[in-house]
Image (cartoon, grey):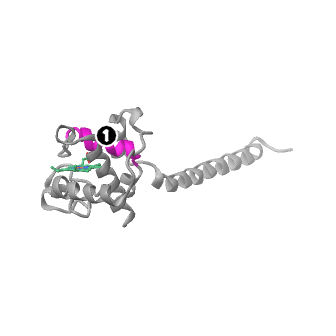
Amino acid sequence: MMNHQDTKTPRTWCLSVLVVAFIVGFAGCAREEVAVPTPDQRAKLLTIPDEYKNRANPLPANYGNLTEGRARFEQYCALCHGPDGKGTTLLGRSLYPPAGDLTLPQVLKYTDGQLYWIISEGIRFSGMPATRAYSTEEQIWRLVLHLRQIQRKQ
Ligand code: HEC
């Protein structure tokens, strides 16, 4: 006849298997996490009104729009983000938080509408300015086209 100890062992074994499966499962999820926004970006996404998420760029990525987008980027954004968007300028690096690298995957994940909102409204408590006061909607959409262009070149 089995004593108390014997009946307990398979149960303990079973429990260990479950715990290991759980940990391995979680490790798998953690690896997937690369595709998920960083906590910092999540905070920024929270400030962007939902209705902007699905706004598509009304302008085509043609030569004229891209040329104007680039010229505007060089005039108004390169000071901090650098002409290549990588944020490696002296001023960009001296800000806290520093001016972001606009070619990173996390920036690529913003929708066009979310990028529009960031450029128009700026990012609170950071050096990222709201450009709405000195930009038309079209000028901002051209900047979004330009950002997509420099991200594609990576
Ligand atoms: C005075 C410096 C400065 C200028 C000029 C500037 N930015 Fe920024 N920008 C920043 C900083 C600083 C951040 C990072 C803010 C943060 O991480 O919270 C930022 C963040 C951003 C982001 C979001 C990046 C991310 O990782 O979430 C975008 C997009 C962006 N800027 C686009 C532009 C565009 C387009 C222009 C030109 C119209 C511009 N910025 C002009 C300083 C600047």
Q: What's drawn in magenta, residue-wise?
A: 110-125
Q: Is mark 1 within 8 Å of ligand 1?
A: no
Q: Is residue 45 left or right of residue 136?
A: right
Residues packed near mark 1 inside 10 Å, few (<14), some (14 to 19) or many (20 plus): many
Q: How many marks?
A: 1
**With respect to residue 134, does 68 lie above or below?**
below
**With respect to residue 129, does 108 lie above or below?**
below
Q: Who's the residue at 57% across and 51% down the image? A: 23
Q: Quadrant of the N terminus?
A: top right
Q: Residue 8, position in %: x, y?
A: 73, 43
Q: Main secondary structure of the magenta part?
A: helix
Using the image as rendered, state which of residue 80 and residue 10 is in the foreground: 80
Instruction: Tell me if residue 22 is in the magenta stretch.
Output: no
Residue 119 lies in quadrant: top left
Instruction: Specify the farthest residue to the front.
Output: 64
Residue 154 lies in quadrant: bottom left
Instruction: Tell me if residue 118 is in the magenta stretch.
Output: yes
Q: Residue 86, position in %: x, y?
A: 26, 61
Q: Residue 70, position in %: x, y?
A: 25, 59
Secondary element under disc 1, as helix, strand or loop, is: helix
Instruction: Specify the farthest residue to the right.
Output: 1
Using the image as rendered, state which of residue 70 and residue 38 is in the foreground: 70
Residue 121 lies in quadrant: top left
Which residue position is annotated with label 1?
117
Q: Is residue 83 left or right of residue 28?
A: left
Q: Residue 10, position in %: x, y?
A: 74, 48
**With respect to residue 40, does 148 lie above or below?**
below
Q: Amino acid at mark 1?
A: Trp
